[in-house]
Amino acid sequence: MMAATRSEVLSLYRRIFQIARKWKSSSGLEEETVKERQYIVEEARKLFRKNKNVTDMETIHQCIEECHARIEIGLHYGIPYPRPTHLPPMGLAVPHSKILRTQEKLRKQAKPLYLKSYDEIS
């Protein structure tokens, strides 16, 4: 099972770099295209290096699903950056209160799949 997962991860890594090589900015400006290509490559390297020691199969599959989602969203919208999302606002709860923990839990559950690792590295 690990060999199949490894080959899937490596093929995703190669696919990201192929996308970066062919990427064209939606604005058509050459400097924007260069910046977006660099972002794609740096983001991929950063996330793959961060997760290289993950051994839990469930976590690995979540990372693979996130990668697929980010690729598809980026190709569909023509924007390599994660799309903004509207999460439930944080209320005026007292720190270390049950209400604050509940709000944090709701925000965590409401976060889309393609943003799971984005906040961790930025």
Image (spheres, helix red, strand yellow):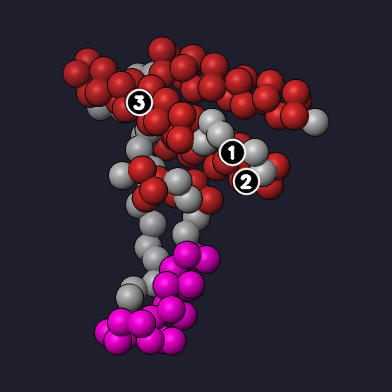
> Reading the chain from its start, which is encountered first: label 2 or label 3?
3
Q: In this view, does 78 lie to the left or right of 27?
A: right
Q: Name the residue under label 1.
A: 54
Occupied quadrant, residue 63? top right
Occupied quadrant, residue 5? top right
Badge 2 marks a residue whose secondary structure is helix
Res 59 label: 2
Q: Which one is in front, 81 or 61?
A: 61
Residue 45 lies, in percent from the top left, at: 42, 25
Label 2 to label 3: alpha-carbon separation = 22 Å
Residue 90 lies, in percent from the top left, at: 33, 75
Badge 1 marks a residue whose secondary structure is loop
Q: In this view, does 24 lie to the left or right of 106?
A: left
Residue at the image point whose x is 35% and y is 38% from the top: 81
- Where, quadrant-wise, is the C terminus in this rendering? top left
Q: Name the residue under label 3.
A: 42
Label 1 to label 2: alpha-carbon separation = 7 Å
Amino acid bearing label 2: Thr
Identify the magenta region.
91-110
Label 3 to label 1: alpha-carbon separation = 20 Å
Res 75 label: none
Residue 31 lies, in percent from the top left, at: 19, 18
Question: Where 96 sits versus 27, above or below?
Answer: below
> Reading the chain from its start, which is encountered first: label 1 or label 2?
1
